[in-house]
Image (cartoon, helix red, strand yellow):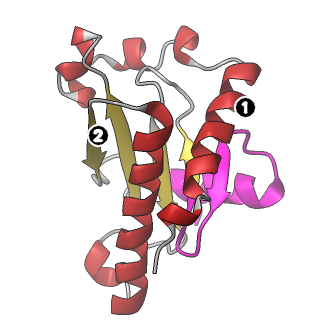
Amino acid sequence: MPNCESCERIQQIKEGTNPYVVAELETGYVVLGDHQYFKGYTLFLCKEHVFELHELNPVFKQKFLAEMAQVAEAVYLAFKPKKLNYELLGNGDPHLHWHIFPRHIDDIRLWGVTWNIDASIRNAEETKPSAEELQSMKEQLRKHINSPANNVV
């Protein structure tokens, strides 16, 4: 869809030009956030271009929610946070997509509300991972997404 940030990212994945893609699941795409202010910040982009969960057919919806939980568990195992925050907002980009934020106790700034942290800080150039860091994070996450213990039934 034109002017849809998630659809644009999905198109880049299909074209092989999105360096942040981790995995394709049945109902969505797993990508690391462009900025890693919260190390391990991951998104799960729905393959269907809808704005609300109730717009998905029931079978797809259940699979989408189960796969989101699978992705969240992989984020937890890969980045070992104290807590995960899950968000499905849609105020800026209404296309269904989950934000999964690993929250670490050893850095007090992380315990505030994510979106209350100024975007110029969250999205500062220094929060972008280097190519080597990005590759390492993708490998860590991919290993846990694909583990036999983390299969959706």
Q: Position of residue 75 (x, y in %)?
A: 45, 43
Residue stretch rendered in magenta on the structure:
1-29
Q: Is residue 19 above or below residue 126?
A: below
Kindly identify the residue that appears in the image at 52 percent across and 36 percent down: 33
Q: Residue furthest front?
A: 149
- Residue appearing at x 42%, y 79% in the figure: 63
Q: Residue furthest right?
A: 16
- Say left or right for 136 vs 93: right
State the image quarter where residue 116 is shown: top left
Residue pointed to by mark 1: 135
Question: Residue at (26%, 41%) from the top-left corner?
Answer: 85
Q: Earlier in the sequence, mark 2 or mark 1?
A: 2
Which mark, by number, is residue 98? none
Quadrant where the image shows the C terminus: bottom left
Residue 128 x, y percent position in the rendering? 59, 19
Residue 13 counted in the magenta span? yes
Residue that mark 2 sits on:
84
In the structure shown, which secondary structural element does the residue marked by tag 2 occupy? strand
Q: Inspect the image, locate mark 1, and give the three-letter code of the amino acid beneath it.
A: Gln
Q: CA distance from mark 2 to mark 1?
A: 22 Å
Q: Secondary structure at mark 1?
A: helix
- Inspect the image, locate mark 2, and give the three-letter code of the amino acid beneath it: Leu
Locate residue 17 relative to residue 50 in the image: left or right.
Answer: right
Provide residue 70's location: percent of width, then percent of height.
43, 61
